[in-house]
Image (tube, rainbow, N blue to C red):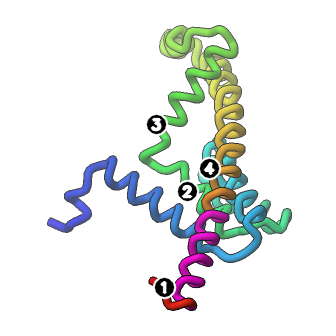
Amino acid sequence: MSPRADRTPLERCRRTFRYIYLRLVRVGGDPVHIALGFALGVFLGVFPTFGLGIPLSLLLASMFRWNRVSAVLGSLVMNPLTTPFFWTLSGTLGAAIFGTDARKVLMSFQNGERLRGLTVGAGIYLAGNTIIALVAAVLSYFLALRAVILYRKKRKERKQRLREGRV
């Protein structure tokens, strides 16, 4: 049995986010452009792009001249471990916005009103998901900017201590 098979889902999630964090703070470039790229990737990762999140994040980051690596990293925030959370949150928020009971929509879908249930369900989901994606993008911008700046500051201080002979 491999060491990877022994990891719990929570441990795998933690390792995934640690990997994204380390890649993000170590990428070169202007911290603002890194954070903008990351926020773009998060938005496109959370928003339903049907598998096109990474290519779209690369394309748009290139067009806006934001950091492409951080855009791809941001789109990885949506992964098999986080998908159920974002889907549930999006559906719940959308139902609250429309004042609809999500179970009634599912029941109408199951009772033969498939097109109506699908259309209403998609609208509810997209309304909630758009808000969730925007909030996640804004939060990720500020978190990424802060993380990159703090990492670079600590690295600079560490190099300065090494030059001065203080370890």
Say what amino acid the circle numbered 4 marks. Answer: Gly
> Can residue 5 be seen from the camera position used here?
yes
Amino acid tagged 1? Arg
In three-dimensional space, the C-alpha distance between marks 2 and 1, rounded to whole angstroms, equals 39 Å
On the image, numbered disc 2 is attached to which residue?
Answer: 76
Q: Which mark is residue 166?
A: 1
Residue at the spot of label 3 = 84
Q: Nearer the viewer, mark 1 or mark 4?
A: 1
Q: Nearer the viewer, residue 27 or 64?
A: 27
The residue under the point 69% across, 58% down is 145
Mark 3–mark 4 Cα distance, whole angstroms, equals 13 Å
Q: What is the magenta range?
A: 148-163
Q: CA distance from mark 3 to mark 1?
A: 48 Å
Find the distance from the CA under tag 4 to the CA under tag 2. Answer: 7 Å
Residue 128's place in the image compared with 137, above or below, is: above
Q: Which residue is mark 4?
A: 45
* For residue 132, above or below residue 69: above
| Disc 2 element | loop
Under circle 1, the secondary element is loop
Of callouts 4 and 2, the N-terminal one: 4
Residue at the spot 75% in from the left edge and 57% down from the top edge: 36
Q: Is residue 111 left or right of residue 72?
A: left
Q: What label sits on residue 125 in the rendered view?
A: none
Crowd class of label 1 (few under 14; some 14 to 19; many from 20; radius 10 Å): few
Q: As rendered, which of 150 and 98 lies closer to the eye?
A: 150
Dot 4 and dot 2 residues touching (CB under 8 Å):
yes
Q: Are marks 2 and 3 in contact (CB under 8 Å)?
A: no
- Where's the N terminus, which quadrant? bottom left
Prevailing secondary structure class for the magenta stretch in the rendered image = helix
Q: Secondary structure beneath disc 4? A: helix
- Sequence order check: which comes first, mark 2 or mark 3? 2
Q: Is tag 3's residue or tag 1's residue first in the polypeptide sequence?
A: 3
